[in-house]
Amino acid sequence: MAELSHVNKNSQPVMVDVSEKKITRRNAVARAMITLPEQVMETLRKDDFMTRKGSVFQTAVIAGIMAAKKTGGLIPLCHPIGLDNCEINIELNGQQDMVIYCTAGVEAKTGVEMEALTGASVAALTIYDMCKALSHDMVIREIKLIEKSGGKNDLKRKK
């Protein structure tokens, strides 16, 4: 059975020691979804996804990238790393959902799944913030890691 990596033999929290690990190319993709009420989606479509605060998509993309870059300062035991790339893509799934993907990559001793998850989460929160004047009946859901590669255990799930 796997053990928790952020707890030492005395059951105290620790940052994982990556000093002996090899630098490899690490990539991760995370997804978040936000469901908007029908009238909100109609209003956004009618206004080309612009609000008084600006473009919903562009603002969410920038916020997600900024958050991914700050992950090491937000998650207490997460290593601070300099991302080599970070990309946020937002899709409409034909229902009332905006589907947000955050792809992050780095050459490092540790992975970027927390950065991808943080980027997707903050992009969804930003969409909520941009649209809350229209309704508070939005639901952020299914924040999850879709894939990761370059570490000890690779992962690939269906989107």
Image (cartoon, rainbow, N blue to C red):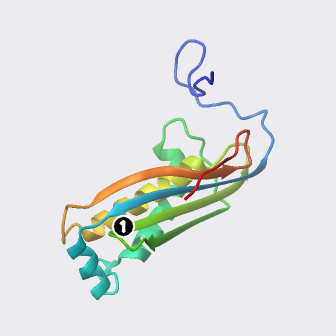
The image shows residue 13 at horizontal and vertical percentages of 52, 24
The answer to which quarter of the image holds residue 140 is bottom left
The image shows residue 66 at horizontal and vertical percentages of 49, 62
Residue 11 is left or right of residue 124, and the answer is: right
The answer to which quarter of the image holds residue 77 is top right
Residue located at (49% from left, 50% from top): 144
Which of the pair 8/46 is nearer the observer? 46
The image shows residue 29 at horizontal and vertical percentages of 59, 57
Quadrant of the drawing holding the N terminus: top right
Q: Of the residues shown, which amino acid type is indicated by label 1?
A: Asp
Residue located at (42% from left, 71% from top): 93
Q: How many marks?
A: 1
Residue 155 is left or right of residue 43, and the answer is: right
Q: Where 81 sits versus 125, above or below?
A: above
Tell me the element at label 1: strand
Query: Within 10 Å of the Cα at label 1, are there few (<14), some (14-19), or many (20+) other Cα atoms?
Result: many
Q: Where 19 sits versus 91, above or below?
A: above
Residue located at (52% from left, 18% from top): 12
* Residue 52 seen from this side: no
* Residue 121 seen from this side: yes
Quadrant of the drawing holding the C terminus: bottom right
Residue located at (49% from left, 37% from top): 76
Q: Which residue is mark 1?
A: 97
Q: Where 149 sits versus 53, above or below?
A: above
Which of the pair 58/38 is nearer the observer? 38
